[in-house]
Image: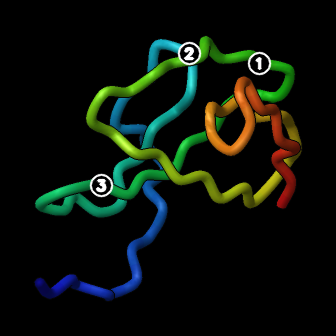
Amino acid sequence: MEFDVSPVPLKEKIDYLAPDGSEIRLLINGLNGNLCHCTLPAGSTTVPVRHRNVEELWFVIEGRGQIWREGLAENEVIEALP
């Protein structure tokens, strides 16, 4: 499977607003997954979601917060830092 590895500029306009208020900008639409840039306003809290068929990966580029995840430890909370 080949991917286009060309640089993708970050769009000024959002593609959609997520239920938690995150601004979603789609970067790459793949056959089995997507890559997007999400902006969550400072001081915001999202609602925990458990996906059935989706695996999320987070890469924090600015700000800080906490991410709840069910992983190595039950109900684990990790610090989200750039």
Which residue in the structure is indicated by mark 1? Answer: 44
Q: Decide: marks 1, 2 in contact (CB < 8 A)?
A: yes
**Given the image, on which type of amino acid does mark 1 rest?**
Ser
Which residue in the structure is indicated by mark 2? Answer: 20
Q: Is residue 46 above or below residue 38?
A: above
Q: Is residue 60 above or below residue 39?
A: below
Cα–Cα span, label 3 and label 1: 24 Å
**Drawn side of residue 20 relative to residue 41, left or right:** left
Give SS at disc 3.
Answer: strand
Which residue in the structure is indicated by mark 3? Answer: 34
Q: Residue at x 86, y 47 (%)?
A: 63
**Given the image, on which type of amino acid does mark 2 rest?**
Asp
**How many numbered callouts?**
3
The nearer-to-camera label among 3 and 1 is: 3
Q: Nearer the viewer, residue 6 or 51?
A: 51
**Drawn side of residue 59 relative to residue 57, left or right:** right
Q: Position of residue 16 (x, y in %)?
A: 36, 29
Q: Residue at x 83, y 61 (%)?
A: 82
